[in-house]
Image (spheres, grey):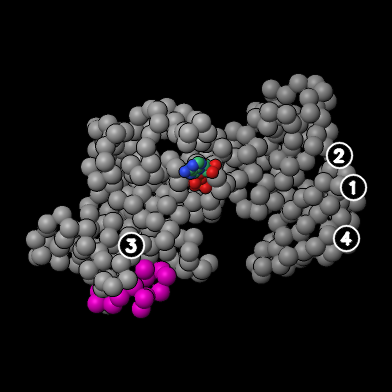
């Protein structure tokens, strides 16, 4: 059993602390995604699990073993980097087998393991090619193949798709999901892209400034965010936030010229932020807001609205009726899908 456990993990560079006591349990066979904006500490945390960065304080366990002070090679992990880090003078086959060769594995065994990985990754036709003659997606598959042949207990991915163009990224995302199903190993995957996090993860860890904001299954984070940061980070386009004030069990929301129900924990006079997802809103007749611009993507379009209060909102439209710029509108909301946050602490009120 090879889950990963982080216990009050802290990282300091000199006097600068960048990871502030992270506790996390990743189950055996789980696909865990670390997500958050640039600089939040995702890569540092992953590199600490890999043993590429020293852990200043706390403990990291892989399976039954405390690996905190172990060498990367002793941890039973294999890492796939954003830059594929392939040897340009070696063929695909040699690149994938190089680690095993260096560790003195017999030729026949290397061939068998490379063959297995190449079949999983559909690289059979490219084994004799050098990296320069491969597409970006194929190179990343070789880098993943190199990790597979080592038979690690835990796979670590550091933004593996960010160097690929949009179409290939989608294709490789599906490949990685399939790979996880097929080999069932524990995987930790770092990305700043919430779509990758939503589509790949069993468990998402949302990080901000070296701290965990929330951990949960993708749809749990989407449906039930604990704070404004998570609510705004998960979901695309991002959740709209407008100001409101609690008054007698209701929240007065000037931007949409209507009131919504206040959650039980709200107190009279409390300043709040009301969160409305673009996909939960519909345009109605009214004049509280004006359509500034409509972006049509075919099956769906996004209306960019400005309220009379100056606040901006995005509304998703489906079907053939699309709004046009300059039109005054009102908003229809589903009261079951309104999120409320304290304006100051940004903690969700329930
Ligand atoms: P992410 O992967 O989420 O973009 P990183 O883990 O790369 O973020 O970085 C987390 C924080 O640690 C950042 O604020 C970064 O500036 C800082 N950091 C990373 N490496 C070093 C270093 N060698 N010395 C000092 N600070 C560092």
Q: Residue at x 67, y 63 (%)?
A: 300
Label 4 vs label 2: CA separation? Answer: 19 Å
Q: Residue at x 42, y 52 (%)?
A: 158
Q: Is residue 10 magenta?
A: no
Q: Disc 4, ligand 1: is the CB inside 8 Å? A: no
- 88 left or right of 135 in image: left
Vertical arrangement, residue 227 with respect to residue 50, above or below: above
- Which residue in the protein does label 1 denote? 308
Callout 2: helix, strand or loop? helix
Label 3 vs label 1: CA separation? Answer: 53 Å
Mark closer to the chain start, 4 or 1: 1
Q: Nearer the viewer, residue 204 or 6?
A: 6
The disc label shown at residue 152, or none = none
- The answer to the question of whether label 4 and label 2 lie on touching residues, with beta carbons closer than 8 A, is no
- The answer to the question of whether label 4 and label 1 lie on touching residues, with beta carbons closer than 8 A, is no
- Which residue in the protein does label 4 denote? 327
Tell me where residue 132 appears, x and y as whole percent: 36, 76
Callout 1: helix, strand or loop? loop
Label 2 vs label 1: CA separation? Answer: 8 Å
Label 4 vs label 3: CA separation? Answer: 52 Å
Which marked residue is nearer to the observer: mark 4 or mark 3? 3
- Which residue in the protein does label 2 denote? 254
* Residue occupying the far front of the picture: 14
Mark closer to the chain start, 4 or 3: 3
Tell me where residue 148 appears, x and y as whole percent: 26, 57
Which marked residue is nearer to the observer: mark 4 or mark 1? 1
């Amino acid at each position: 059993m090879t889950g990963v456990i982080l216990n009050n993990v802290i990282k300091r560079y000199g006097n600068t602390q960048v990871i502030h006591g992270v506790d996390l349990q990743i189950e055996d066979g789980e696909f865990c995604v670390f997500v958050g904006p640039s600089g939040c500490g995702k890569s540092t945390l992953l590199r600490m699990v890999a043993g590429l960065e020293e852990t200043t304080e706390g403990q990291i366990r892989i399976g039954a073993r405390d690996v905190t002070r172990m060498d990367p090679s002793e941890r039973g992990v294999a890492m796939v980097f954003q830059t594929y880090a392939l040897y340009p003078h070696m063929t695909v086959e040699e690149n994938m087998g190089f680690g095993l060769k260096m560790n003195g594995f017999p030729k026949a065994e290397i061939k068998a393991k490379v063959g297995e990985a190449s079949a999983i990754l559909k690289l059979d036709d490219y084994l004799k090619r050098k990296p320069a003659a491969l597409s970006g997606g194929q190179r990343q598959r070789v880098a993943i193949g190199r990790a597979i042949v080592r038979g690690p207990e835990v796979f670590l991915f550091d933004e593996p798709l960010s160097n690929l163009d949009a179409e290939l990224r989608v294709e490789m995302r599906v490949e990685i999901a399939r790979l996880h199903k097929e080999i069932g190993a524990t995987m930790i995957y770092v990305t700043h892209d919430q779509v990758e996090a939503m589509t790949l993860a069993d468990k998402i860890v949302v990080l901000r400034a070296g701290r965990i904001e929330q951990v949960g299954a993708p749809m749990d984070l989407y449906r039930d965010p604990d704070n404004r940061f998570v609510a705004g980070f998960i979901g695309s386009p991002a959740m709209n936030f407008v100001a409101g004030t609690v008054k007698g069990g209701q929240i007065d929301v000037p931007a949409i010229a209507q009131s919504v129900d206040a959650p039980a924990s709200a107190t009279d006079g409390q300043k709040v932020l009301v969160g409305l997802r673009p996909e939960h809103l519909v345009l109605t007749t009214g004049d509280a807001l004006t359509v500034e611009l409509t972006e049509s993507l075919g099956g769906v379009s996004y209306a960019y609205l400005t309220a009379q209060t100056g606040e901006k909102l995005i509304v998703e439209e489906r079907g053939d009726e699309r709004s046009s710029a300059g039109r005054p509108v009102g908003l229809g909301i589903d009261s079951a899908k309104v999120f409320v946050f304290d304006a100051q602490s940004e903690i969700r009120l329930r």
